[in-house]
Amino acid sequence: MKAVVVYESLWGNTAAVARAIAEGIGPEARALSTAEATPEAIAGAALIVAGAPIQGFSLPTDRMRDGVKLDTVPAPDVSAPTLRSWLEHLPPGHGRSAAFDTKIRWSPGSAASVIDRELTKAGYNPLAKAEHFLVAGQTGPLKDGEIERARAWGGQLARIAG
Ligand SMILES: Cc1cc2nc3c(=O)[nH]c(=O)nc-3n(C[C@H](O)[C@H](O)[C@H](O)COP(=O)(O)O)c2cc1C
């Protein structure tokens, strides 16, 4: 089963979660940034897992991204498109999906719910409830145990996908 884990990540936390999820799914899964996940790279994927940081209680917008201070230490990587724009350009397909996000704390909104909705629209139906992973601050690091939890979640997704 071809599986891709697509991510948006400014400071690498969501990217690290995405890599752990891909490891958990197994050797047929690859973690790709929104820049790497071209239509060719995801063609024929039976499972698309997509994740992004929560910004402003939701999936980051280009406007939110433009407001991010570039002089934080470490500096954010803003070279890849937002996941929101990647989802807008996702070619229709047939497969299953799962969504995740990273965030600082309990948040009234979620990025994963928007991701689930957009993946469903493109023909990739969610096979599991969205998952949320916690960072200790805006630039990270991930809270203890989150990488292990991400790997385990990837394993669960693979089992459900069969
Ligand atoms: C502009 C901005 C808005 C944010 N808004 C929220 C928020 O509403 N709720 C929350 O829990 N975290 C919020 N965060 C923290 C991000 O979720 C955190 O930076 C992210 O998980 C780090 O992941 P990354 O290294 O993959 O970018 C915000 C961060 C930024 C830069």
Image: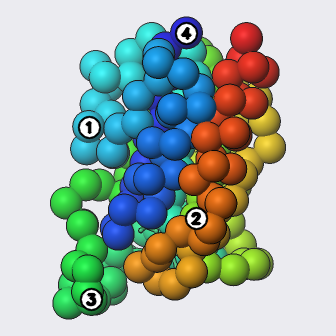
Which label's residue is closer to the chain start, 1 or 2? 1
Specify the amino acid type for callout 3.
Answer: Thr
Does 37 sit left or right of 111 as displayed?
left
Disc 2 secondary structure class: strand
Q: Residues within 10 Å of mark 3 (few under 14, many from 20)?
A: few
Instruction: Residue 38: name its quadrant.
Output: top left
Instruction: Residue 105: name its quadrant.
Output: bottom right
Residue at which label 2 appears = 102
Pair 1/2: label in front? 2
Residue under the image location 63 percent in, 49 percent down: 148
Residue at which label 1 appears = 36
Residue at which label 3 appears = 72
Measured as percent of width and height from the top left, residue 139 is found at 41, 79
How far apart are the two marked residues, 4 and 2, measured between alpha carbons?
Answer: 26 Å
Indicate whether 109 appears above or below 22. Answer: below
Residue at which label 4 appears = 1
Which label's residue is closer to the chain start, 4 or 1? 4
Specify the amino acid type for callout 2.
Answer: Thr
The quadrant in which the N terminus is found is top right
Disc 1 secondary structure class: loop
